[in-house]
Amino acid sequence: MAKFQHGIFGCFDNCCICLIAYFVPCYIFGRNAGAVGESCFLYGLVFAVPIFGVLFHWSIRSKIRSSRNIDGNCIKDMLAVCLCPCCALIQEAQEVNAPRTQSMARS
């Protein structure tokens, strides 16, 4: 299994995503949701509601992990989403924006 291409604290690897995620996290979350086949608009709106935002963020992080064949589990996903949500959001955005590697393309 693969790992995320950027670490959880690799927030500044892409300053543009970092700034947008800090000031307009709903936009980045919606784009991440859209990348795994969910409604960009609906998920962006839901992200603004505190409890639902956490649950939906957890769900989308798991879908990104599954679609990219990234190692992890639901507990690690929930810890990332609850303890460092902005860093997790940026990590996911960097992952969905990154080109897939050759091994992922065959999966």
Image (tube, helix red, strand yellow):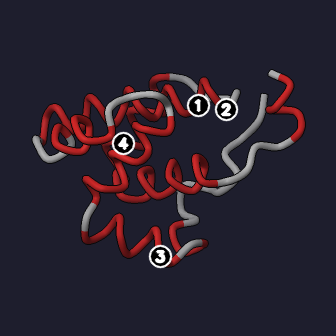
Mark closest to the chain's N terminus, 4 or 1? 1
Q: Secondary structure at mark 1?
A: helix
Q: Secondary structure at mark 4?
A: helix
What residue type is disc 3 on? Cys
What residue type is disc 4 on? Val
Spatial distance from mark 3 to mark 1, Cα to Cα?
23 Å
Q: Position of residue 33 (x, y in %)?
A: 40, 37
Spatial distance from mark 4 to mark 2, Cα to Cα?
18 Å
Residue at image point 77% right, 35% down: 2
Mark closest to the chain's N terminus, 3 or 4? 3
Q: Say if mark 3 contacts mark 4, CB within 8 Å.
A: no
Instruction: Please say if 24 is above or below 30.
Output: below
Q: Position of residue 27 (x, y in %)?
A: 30, 56
| Mark 1 lies on residue | 65
| Mark 3 lies on residue | 16
**Comparing labels 3 and 4, the label whose residue is closer to the camera:** 3
| Mark 2 lies on residue | 68
Residue at image point 21% right, 43% down: 47
Q: Secondary structure at mark 3?
A: helix
Spatial distance from mark 2 to mark 1, Cα to Cα?
5 Å
Spatial distance from mark 3 to mark 2, Cα to Cα?
23 Å
Q: Say if mark 4 contacts mark 1, CB within 8 Å.
A: no
Q: Say if mark 2 contacts mark 1, CB within 8 Å.
A: yes
Instruction: Please say if 25 is above or below 52.
Output: below
| Mark 4 lies on residue | 81
Residue at image point 35% right, 64% down: 21
What residue type is disc 1 on? Arg
